[in-house]
Image: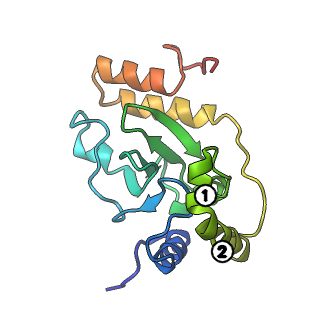
Amino acid sequence: MSDAYSPIPELNLLKEFQDSLGGQFFAPGFELIAYDDDLDWFCGDAPEAYLERLIPFAYATSSGSFYALWRCDDRTDLAELPVIFFGDEGDLWIEARNLRELFRLLAAEADDPEDRDRVAPARERYLAWLDQNFGTGDAEREVLAEYARRFADWVAEFASEELLDQVVGALGLDGRGAVTGG
C-alpha cells in the first residue's frame, strides 16, 4: 500500500510542499485536507452514487469552504478534472478547469493587506515551487460556463427542486441553463 496522499501526482507534490511549510499558509485559507473526505455540501440531499463523483481535497477558506474535483466524465487523469468551490454559506462555482489552473490561481496575491502579510514568506516559497514543478504562466480566468451548465445538469439528476434552484442561482445560471451576468 502506498503512503502517497492521493492517486494524483500533482496533489502529492503540493502535499509535500504544504508539509514542508510547518503550518504556514501560502494562500489565505487554503489547506489540503484528507483526500476524498466525506464532505457533503448537498446536506444529505444527494445519493451516495452522486457524492462519489466529488473528490474533496482542500479547504478554500478558513471558514469551512472547500474545493473538490468533479468527476464530470470518465477521464483517467484526475488532475484534469474541473475544480468546484463549495462555500460554507451556499456559494458554489467552478473555480478552475483543472488542478494546474487552480495552482496558478492560488499564486495570486491576496487582496487583504493582513492576509498578504500573513502568507508572504510561504507565498514566495510557493511561487518558486510552482515555477519549478509546473512552470510559470497565468491562470486563464475565463468564465467556465460550459462546466457550470454541465454541473447543474448533473445536480438536476438527483436534487430536489429547491436544491436545484439554489445550485442554478449559485452558479449564476438562469432556469434555462444560460449564464447570467455578474
Q: Pointer 2: what residue?
A: 129
Give yes or no for contact between labels 2 and 1 (Cβ–Cβ under 8 Å).
Answer: no
Please give left or right for residue 21 compared with residue 98 in the image.
Answer: left
Q: For the point 62% across and 54% down, which residue is it?
A: 116
Task: Name the foreground residue: 180 vs 16.
Answer: 16
Q: Is residue 45 above or below residue 20?
A: above
Q: Earlier in the sequence, mark 2 or mark 1?
A: 1
Residue 97 visible here: no
Residue 72 drawn at (x, y percent): 48, 46
Residue 96 visible here: yes
- Secondary element at image label 2: helix
Distance between the Cα atoms at labels 2 and 1? Answer: 19 Å
Q: Is residue 150 above or below residue 78?
A: above
Q: Pointer 1: what residue?
A: 117
> Which kind of residue does numbered mark 2 sit on?
Trp
Q: For the point 75% across and 69% down, which residue is it?
A: 135
Please give left or right for residue 62 compared with residue 105 in the image.
Answer: left
Q: For the point 29% across and 36% down, which residue is it?
A: 42
Quadrant in the picture for the C terminus: top right
Write down the quadrant of residue 160 in the picture.
top left
- Secondary element at image label 1: helix
Q: Is residue 175 above or below residue 145?
A: above
Task: Name the foreground residue: 170 vs 17.
Answer: 17
Please give left or right for residue 13 compared with residue 64 in the image.
Answer: right
Residue at far right of view: 137
Residue 20 drawn at (x, y percent): 50, 80
Q: Is residue 173 above or below residue 55?
A: above
> Which kind of residue does numbered mark 1 sit on?
Asp
